[in-house]
Amino acid sequence: MDVREILDPRGWLLPHGGPRYMQLRRRLESAIESGQIAPGTPLPPEREIAEMTTLSRVTVRKAIQPLVAAGLVEQRRGSGTIVAPRVAKVEQSLSILTSFTEDMARRGRKSASVWLARGIFLPSPEEMIALGLAAGDSVSRITRLRLADDDPMAIERAALPCDILPDPLTVERSLYEVLERDGNRPVRALQRISAINLNEEDAALLGVPEGDAGLRIERTSYLPEGRVVEFTRSVYRGDAYDFVAELRLAEEGTRT
């Protein structure tokens, strides 16, 4: 259906339907979510929408801003307002230690990587502390953009001791597959999750506007004997992930 037909006020603008900007917002939201307006479709400029709907430009702007905030449309410099591409959300448990490749395989999605960097480097102070490295030690680093069904989902920056991963080039698909093959797969991990606004570099890699919501996750993974085997700092798209944790009632005697 043509956007002009969708915005024809005779089909939705009612005298007693509430504030006019809310009626327009609901009309656009419904058309986007139902697929009547496809992802990637440019919306007409505010001036044209105002003419089509008999509303003021201020009312049109007030209707569109919540759609921008919700991630349904994107405002791109030089391109106007465009319906945002749809990315299927991934629900990931926080109680199971798995790799990205395993997560996607369980959901029937095809995982892939774009290598951004991998090699042997001098460790940063943060890596030295996290991995328990001594002065003069080196660190194996792998940095990659993770994709699911060709959609960019996350940027992973992993650091490991060189005796755990002597050659980062051996990691072709799954880091955990290599670690398991060598008897170094972690059995537990601590994760710290924080909300962020994506910077220009990370947003460009993830294919979203700068400043969009994202998740920063730091993971420190351990071998059975307690040694740290992996320190990973990842950035996830906020619109593509839901992290889920199961909570249980504390045992009697431990409640506060």
Image: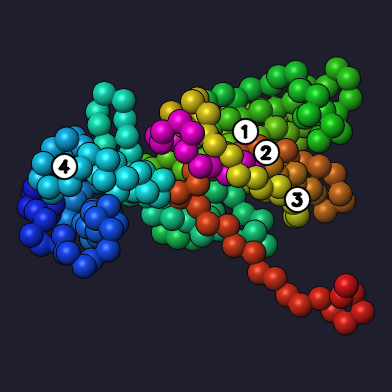
- Whichever of labels 4 and 2 marks the residue nearer the N terminus, that label is 4
Is disc 4 placed on a helix, strand or loop? helix
Crowding around mark 4 (Cα neighbors within 10 Å: few <14, some 14 to 19, many 20+) is some
* Residue type at tag 2: Thr
Q: Extreme right residue here?
A: 253
- Whichever of labels 3 and 2 marks the residue nearer the N terminus, that label is 3
Q: Which residue is mark 1?
A: 157
Q: Cα distance, mark 3 to mark 4?
A: 52 Å
Is disc 3 placed on a helix, strand or loop? strand
Q: Cα distance, mark 3 to mark 2?
A: 11 Å
Q: Which residues are magenta?
A: 206-217
* Residue type at tag 3: Leu
Q: Which residue is mark 4?
A: 50
Where is residue 76 shown, x and y percent of the image?
A: 31, 30
Q: Is residue 15 magenta?
A: no
Question: Taking 198 as reference, is 219 above or below it?
Answer: below
Q: Which residue is mark 2?
A: 232
